[in-house]
Image (cartoon, coloured by chain):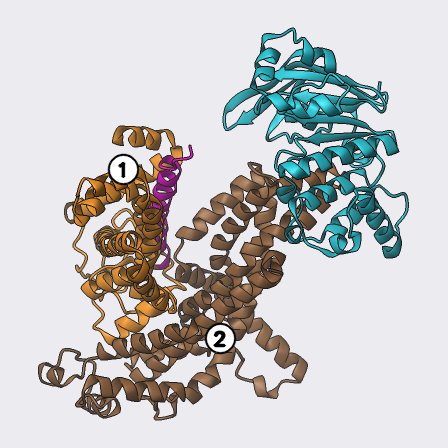
Chain colours: A orange, B cyan, C brown
Amino acid sequence: MISIYLHRIFRNKLAFAGALLMVILIILALTAPWLAPSHFADQSLIDRLQPPSGKHWMGTDDLGRDVFSRLLWGTRVSLVVAFVAVGIATLFGTLVGLIAGYFGRWTDAVLMRAVDILLCFPTFFLILMVIAFLEPNIVNVMIVIGVTSWTGLARLVRGETLSLRERDFILAARALGASTPRILFVHLLPNVVAPVVVSATLGVGGAILTESALSFLGLGVQPPDPSWGNMLSAGKDYIYFAWWLSVFPGLAILTTVMAFNLLGEGLRDALDPRS
Amino acid sequence: MLLSIKNISVDYFRGKKIIPALRNASLEIAEGESVGLVGESGSGKSTLALAALRLISPHEGNITQGKIIFQGKDILALPEQDMRAIRGKDIGIIFQDPFSSLNPVLRIGDQIEEAIQVHAENKLSQADLKKSALAALSNARLPEPERIYNSYPHQVSGGQRQRAMIAMAIANSPRLLIADEPTTALDVTVQKEILDLLAQLRKDMGMALILITHHLGIVSQTTDRIYVLKNGEVVESGATRSVLSSPAHSYTQELLRAVPQTAKVHRA
Amino acid sequence: MMIPLLLGITLMTFFIMQLAPGKPTDLVTDLNTRMSSEAREKLVKLYELDRPWHERYWKWLKRMSRLDFGTSFRDGRPVIKKIAESLPATLLLNILSLILIFTAALAIGIFSAVKKDSLFDKISTFFVYLGFSVPTFWVALLLMIGLGLKLGLLPISGLRSIHYSDLSAWRKFLDMSAHLVLPVFVMALTGLAGLARYSRSAMLEVIRQDYVRTARAKGLPERTVILKHAFRNALIPIVTLLGLMLPELIGGSFIFETIFAYPGMGRLGYDAIMARDYPMLMGIGTIVALLTLAGNLLADLLYAFCDPRIRYQ
C-alpha cells in the first residue's frame, strides 16, 4: 500500500518538488555546522554591515556575523522547532480525536467542549499570551505551539473515527473480543493516517511561520541563537541601508514554508481516496 | 420534422480520460408527437437531450460528429445568443430531481418569472410577470398557485416541485418539451399524476414530448414511438406498441423481461 | 450553548494566569529575571496567591463579570479604560481590512472558478500558494520600507500625524485615511489567500449543481447564471467564514500594529507583554475571547439570514 502512495507522490509534480526541497532543507540543517563558512556567533566588528560579496555571500550583520552562515544555522532552529511542535500537536490531536470519536456521547461532548473553548482564542494570540506568562525560550515555544494547534487535527480524526466506527471490520474486531487500545491503535489508527500526515505536513509550514513571528517580536528564540525571525528583527533597524539583512531571512522562511505546503497539498491530492 | 438528430457522437472528459457517451445516435420527432427514449443509466439518453440543447460545457465534453436540425435551423452552427433564445422558449426541459434542479435560495415564483422575462420582447411589469407565472403554475395543475409562487423549493412537496418545474419549462409555450426521468425521484402515486399532466399539456398546447426513462412501463402508455439505447448506441426504434410486443433486438427483450408483470404492454 | 463557553473562557484565562511566576514557591527560586520584587509583590496581592485556588477563581469570576481587570502595572490606570480607548482603532483597522479581503477574494475566487484552468486561474493559484507561505510581518516590513520610506508616498506609523489637531475636519479625515492605507493594504494582502481559495472551491462546487444547469436550460445569459444563481448559493458558506475571520484578524493584527506603531489594542497588548503587565494581558485576553464568541455568533446569524432553508424551517 505504501508503494502505491509513493508512486502517486512521484507522479504529482508539485508534491515531488516539495519533497525534494524538504530533503534539501533537512540536509542543510544537518550539515550546517560543517557547511557554514563561520559559526553563527562569530563576530567581526571591522566587517560590520558589509553588502553581499565573494567573501560573505549574503553580507554581514551589525555585529559582523556572516549572514549566510547564520541562515544555515537558522535552518536547524526552524526545522527542529517545527517538527517537535507538530509532533506534539499530532500526538495529542490524534489521541483526542480517536478517543472522542470512538467512545462518543459524554467523552465526545466533553472533549469537543474543550476544543471549542480553546478555539475561543485566536491561535497566535493565545500563543502570545501564554509565552508572555512563561519565559520565552526555544523549548517553551515548541511546547506552546504544539499545545495550541492540535484542535484542527482532533476534529478531523474524530470525524474519520466516527464514520469508521460502524464499519464491519471494527465490529468484527469487537466481536472477537479485541481490547479497546488494540482497536484504537491497530485497527482505527492506520485508516486515519492519511489525513493526519497531510495535516502534519501543512502544520510544519504553519509552525515555522509562527515561530519566526514570535522570534521577530522577541518572544521566541533569543539572540545570539540564530532564528530567521530574530534575524529579521535585528535587521529592521538597518533596513534602509542594509537591505540584505531583511531580504534573505525572509526568503528563507518563504522557501521553507512553501516547500512543506507544496508537499502537503501534493500529499493531499495523492492520498485522496476519490482519485 | 420538428427535431432531427442525425449520427450524433459525444465524448465526455474525466480528468485526462475520454469517455464515449454516444455513438452515432439518431432520433427524430415531429410536431405534436410523443417519443420515448429508453435505456439503463449510463446508456447516454440524458446526454442526447443535453446535446440537443447544447448544454454540455466544453469542460465536460464535446459533440464530435453529427447534425442537429430544429425547426430547420442547424443547432450546432448557431451562435450562442441564438441558442439561448431557443432554450426555455422553443424547447423546454425538465430534469429528474426537482429538488436539486431548482435554486434553493430563490422563490419559485421568482424562478418562473425569470424564465418568462428573459424571452419576452420588452421589459414586463412585475404585475404582468406575476400573472404569467401564476398562469403557468395553474396550467401545471397546482391547486394553490399563489402559495407555491411565494414558496422556496424546500417548502413544497416533491410532486409540487416537479409540477413547478414543468410550469417553468412550459411558461413560454415551447414546441418541444424534453422530460428527463421526470418521475424517477417521485412516489409511485405521484408518478401517474405527473404523466397525466404531461399528456394533458401535450394535447392542450400541441407540444411534442421526448420522454426519457429507464422504465418501460412508463413509455408503453405515454409514447407513440420509442428508441432503445444501449451503451451510447440506438439498438432499436419504432412504434411503441410493435417494439414492445415483438422486440427485434436482444437487449430490448432483456429490458422487457425485467419489467414486472403488471406494467407490461396493454393490448388495448 | 454560550454559558459553558463563557465559563470555559474564565477557566482558561484563570489557568493561564496561574502560569505566571510569582507563586509563593517561585519567590524563592526567582526564575523570571525580568520581574522586579516590587512587581512580584503586586502580583501576589492582586491575585491573592496566598489563598486557596477555588477562592481565587471565584473572585476572578466575579471581577470578570464586571469587566474589572484591575489596574495596569505600567501606569496604574484601570485596564478596562485603556482597552476601551484602543479598541475602536483596532476594530477600524480590522473591519476595513475585512471589507477589502472580502471583495478582493470573492472577485478572484469567482473569476478563477468560472475560468477554471485558464492563465488567470493558474497565476492566482500560484499567488495564493505564495500567500499561504509568506511571513506576513516580512511583507509588512518590506512594503513599509518600499512604499513608505523609499518612495515617501505614505506615512508609516501611527494613526494621526503630529500636527493632526491643527487640521481642518476634511484634512483630518484625509490624514487618518493616509495612515490607514498601508496597514489595511498589508493586512488584506496577506489575509487574502485563504478566502480566495475557499471561494474558488465553493464556487466550483456550486457551478456543478443541477440548478445551474436548469438556469442555463432556461436560456438565461451566462452572467445571470453565474451571478444570480451560482454566486448567491456559493455566498452562503463564504459569508459564515466572515464572522469567523474577524477574530483571527484581530489576533493577527498584533504584529501589524506593532510594526506600524498603530495605536490599537494589539500594540497595547505587545507593550503589555514586553513589560509583563499581567492585568493588562488578562483583560485583553478576555476581550479578545469575547470578540471571538461574538464573531462566531455573527457567523451563525449571517448563515441563517442568507440561507432560506434555515430561515424558514
Q: Nearer the viewer, mark 1 or mark 2?
A: 1
Q: Which mark is residue A169?
A: 1
The image shows residue C201, relative to residue C289, as above or below, that is above
Viewer-proximal residue, A63 or C58?
C58
Left or right: B152 as drawn, with respect to C265: right
Mark 1 neighbour class, 10 Å CA radius: few under 14, some 14 to 19, many 20 or more:
some
The reply, left or right, for residue B131 in relation to residue C61 is: right
Residue A188 horizontal/vertical position (percent): 26, 44
Image mark 1: chain: A
Residue A51 on image: x %, y %: 33, 55
Which residue is depicted at the point 45% across and 68% down?
A: C247
Q: Answer whether residue C144 is magenta in the image.
A: no
Q: Which mark is residue C90?
A: 2
Q: Write the residue at 20% across / 72% down.
A: A135
Residue C238: percent from the left, percent from the top?
Answer: 54, 56
Q: Amino acid at mark 2?
A: Thr
Which portion, as a residue range, is magenta?
Answer: A246-275
Numbered label attached to residue B73: none
- Calculate the distance from the C-alpha at mark 1 to the C-alpha at mark 2: 53 Å
**Residue B90 visible to the viewer:** no
- Considering the image in quadrants, where does the C terminus of chain C appear? bottom right
Q: Is residue C214 left or right of residue A155?
A: right
